[in-house]
Amino acid sequence: MRNRVLYAFAVVSAALLAMNLYTIFMKLPDELNQGMIYRIIYFHLPAALTCFTAFFCGLVASAGYLTTKDMRYDAVAASVTEVGLAFATVNLVTGSIWGRIIWGIWWTWDARLTSMFVCWLLYVAYLMLRRAIEEPVQRARLSAVLSIFAFTDVIIVWKSIEWWRTQHPGPVLTIRGGGGMAPGMQAPIYWNWLAMMLLGAILVAVRMRQENMRREIDSLRREAYAF
Amino acid sequence: MDSRNFTFLFYGFLAAWLILMVYVVSIVARERKLRQDLDRLRSMIEERSNK
């Protein structure tokens, strides 16, 4: 049953991505100033929204672990954070490629880019911390604290284009008060976000299954050494 | 400008897909290793309990 749901998610996600690719390349016109390179935003922005959603779920799960000490919350936090980090990498790399054409540089240390890079480093540190600590309860407690701390940077990333005058463009979506994009051009961003969220949900489900397997392996090891 | 634009747009989409594909492959590889470990431990415990 669970596998069927995952397959259904995969089919819907693939269909949405294919439909969006058709819209992005065949239906939408080039942007007046940027030309065709602006289309990178259809992966860059949904990847950012997906990773922020994942990191928020990580925050909630980490707080859940600290209040209940239930290891299932720890498994959720670890899974969503890892998947979120993959999408954060997509966001950083696609943004850098776009910047090379529009700004003439791969990278600049402005508020948005720097805070996003720090965010990426914090969540890499989260995964490294998990690998470094053997004892499960200590690992869960410390990584939950780090996850909650790391999320403060997500808020800084989100607000950085409002708080500081950055080289990074301001908000483009109407729901964020931006008005830089025609509504017809905004729609594929939301559809791609949905497609990436579905893909992310599949990856999180698989990663959670692996976390459960890892827990079973740990308990079997203890049993094996007890003989 | 237009041909460079197209090339970099291609790089952008390629990078996005490549990162996600590499991550999916790493998850599949991890799953295989975990299953092997699990099977090995289960058979080891079963063997010991049969002795």
Image (cartoon, coloured by chain):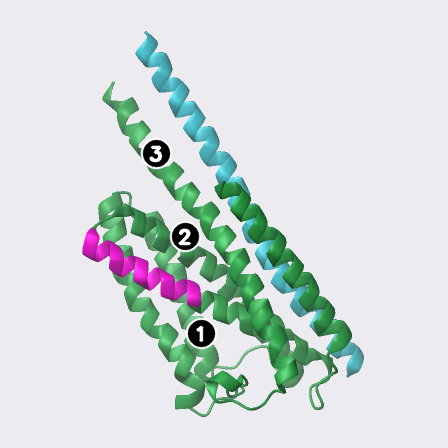
Chain colours: A green, B cyan
Q: Position of residue B29 (x, y in %)?
A: 53, 41
Counting other residues with Cα less than 10 Å from the Cα at mark 2, is it few (<14), some (14-19), or many (20 or more)? Answer: many
User: What crowding class fits label 3: few (fewer than 14 Cα within 10 Å), some (14-19), or many (20 or more)?
Assistant: some
Pointer 3 residue = A216
Q: Is residue A63 above or below residue A211?
A: below
In primary-sequence order, the first of circles 1 and 2 is 2
The residue drawn where x is 69% and y is 65% is A19
- Report x, y in % for residue B24: 56, 50
Chain bearing tag 1 is A
Give the magenta range. Answer: A53-68
Q: Are marks 1 and 2 in contact (CB under 8 Å)?
A: no
Q: x, y percentage for residue B31?
A: 49, 39
Q: Is residue B26 visible?
A: no
Q: Chain of mark 2?
A: A
Judge if badges 1 and 3 mark residues of a common chain: yes
Quadrant housing the C terminus of chain A: top left
| Crowding near the residue tagged with mark 1, few <14, some 14–19, many ≥20 C-alpha atoms within 10 Å | many
Give the mark nearest the N terminus, 3 or 2. 2
Magenta residue check for A64: yes
- Name the residue at 41% across, 84% down: A160
In the structure shown, which secondary structural element does the residue marked by tag 2 occupy? helix
Provide residue A220's location: percent of width, then percent of height.
32, 28
> In the current view of this chain or complex, which residue is farthest to the front?
A1
**Residue A42 part of the magenta segment:** no
Q: Amino acid at mark 1?
A: Met
Q: Which residue is mark 1?
A: A116
| Inter-mark Cα distance, 1 to 3 | 36 Å
Mark linked to residue A79: 2
Residue type marked 3: Glu
Please tell me whether mark 1 or mark 3 is closer to you in this view: 3
Q: Main secondary structure of the magenta part?
A: helix
